Amino acid sequence: MSHKLVSLKPISQEDAHALLPIWSDPVVTKWTRYSILLSLSEVKARIKQLEQTKHASR
């Protein structure tokens, strides 16, 4: 999905470095159903889980 101001794409492993500061922030994660992630390997595992869930729901 894209617009001249916003472009959305599925989360991928390439996004792990960008997501770590977000998914490790307690101010952010208190509003989600997920726990805080503290390492890049945890973020990559969460992305893999989300990718598998996406494929399973098709």
Image (tube, rainbow, N blue to C red):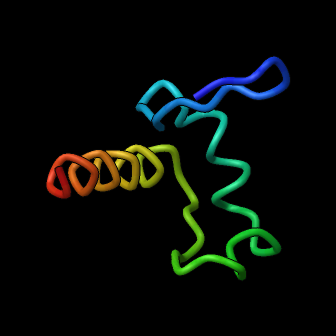
Question: Is 13 left, or right, of 21 in this rendering?
Answer: left
Question: Is 14 left, or right, of 38 in this rendering?
Answer: left
Q: Quadrant of residue 25?
A: bottom right
Residue at the location (63% across, 47% down)? 20
Give the x, y percent position of residue 19. Answer: 63, 44
Question: Is 28 left, or right, of 24 in this rendering?
Answer: right
Q: Quadrant of residue 57?
A: bottom left
Is 6 drawn above or below residue 42 in the view shown?
Answer: above
Question: Is 25 left, or right, of 17 in this rendering?
Answer: right
Give the x, y percent position of residue 32. Answer: 62, 76
Give the x, y percent position of residue 56. Answer: 14, 55
Is 10 drawn above or below residue 38 in the view shown?
Answer: above
Residue at the location (41% across, 46% down)? 41
**Foreground residue, 47 or 24?**
47
- Looking at the rendering, in which quadrant would you find the N terminus? top right
Residue at the location (74% across, 23% down)? 3
Q: Residue furthest top?
A: 4
